[in-house]
Image (tube, helix red, strand yellow):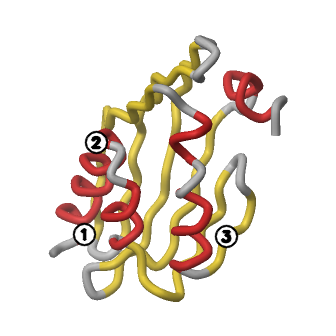
Amino acid sequence: MDTRGVIERYYELANKGDWSAWTDLFAENQVMDEQLAGHVEGQQTLRDMMTGFPDMYARFQNVPRHIVVDGDQAAVVSHISAATHTGAEIEADVANYFRVEDGRIVYMSNHHDTVPFLPVTAGA
């Protein structure tokens, strides 16, 4: 899969809530700098982290608004619409940077305002 295909699949699987297949898009030695989760290294660490994701959100959608691909790099501007199990609504604009090698995400960084996510992080 080329870089655009990987990125499109990333959002497709996230919006389906298929976190196992979503995690498969990452290389075993992946590195992620995530706004809320911090620095995450390794596919298995990411997989373990994502098993708790459905417990945090009753609904989660991350819809790309603009995708730019340049070789093995991509930048995506998207919008997250989510809700917690207690009914708190979350709306946030997001910017993600990806580096893809051999059809797998090797690096990703996630950038957004953390305030909309207080209903999730305050309980953590």
Marked residue nearer the N-terminal end (1 or 3) = 1
- Element on which disc 3 rests: strand
Q: Quadrant of residue 17?
A: top left
- Label 2 vs label 1: CA separation? 20 Å
Q: Is residue 77 above or below residue 19?
A: above
Q: Residue at x 69, y 31 (%)?
A: 113
Disc 3 marks a residue whose amino acid type is Val
Quarter of the picture containing the N terminus is bottom left
- Label 1 vs label 3: CA separation? 21 Å
- Mark 1 neighbour class, 10 Å CA radius: few under 14, some 14 to 19, many 20 or more: many
**Could you say where residue 108 lies in the image, as x and y percent from the top left?**
52, 65
Q: Quadrant of residue 86?
A: top right
Q: Residue at x 55, y 25 (%)?
A: 92
List the residue tagged with mark 1. 3
**Could you say where residue 89 lies in the image, as x and y percent from the top left?**
57, 13
Disc 1 marks a residue whose amino acid type is Thr
Q: Is residue 11 above or below residue 78?
A: below
List the residue tagged with mark 2. 16
- Element on which disc 2 rests: helix
Quarter of the picture containing the C terminus is top right
Disc ID at residue 40: 3
Marked residue nearer the N-terminal end (2 or 1) = 1
**Could you say where residue 121 lies in the image, as x and y percent from the top left?**
78, 35
Disc ID at residue 70: none
Q: Nearer the viewer, residue 10 or 84?
A: 84
- Element on which disc 1 rests: helix
Q: Quadrant of residue 33?
A: bottom right
Disc 2 marks a residue whose amino acid type is Lys
- Label 2 vs label 3: CA separation? 22 Å
For discs 2 and 3, the disc positioned in front in the rendered view: 2
Would you say the residues marked 2 and 1 are in contact, meaning their CB atoms lie under 8 Å apart?
Answer: no
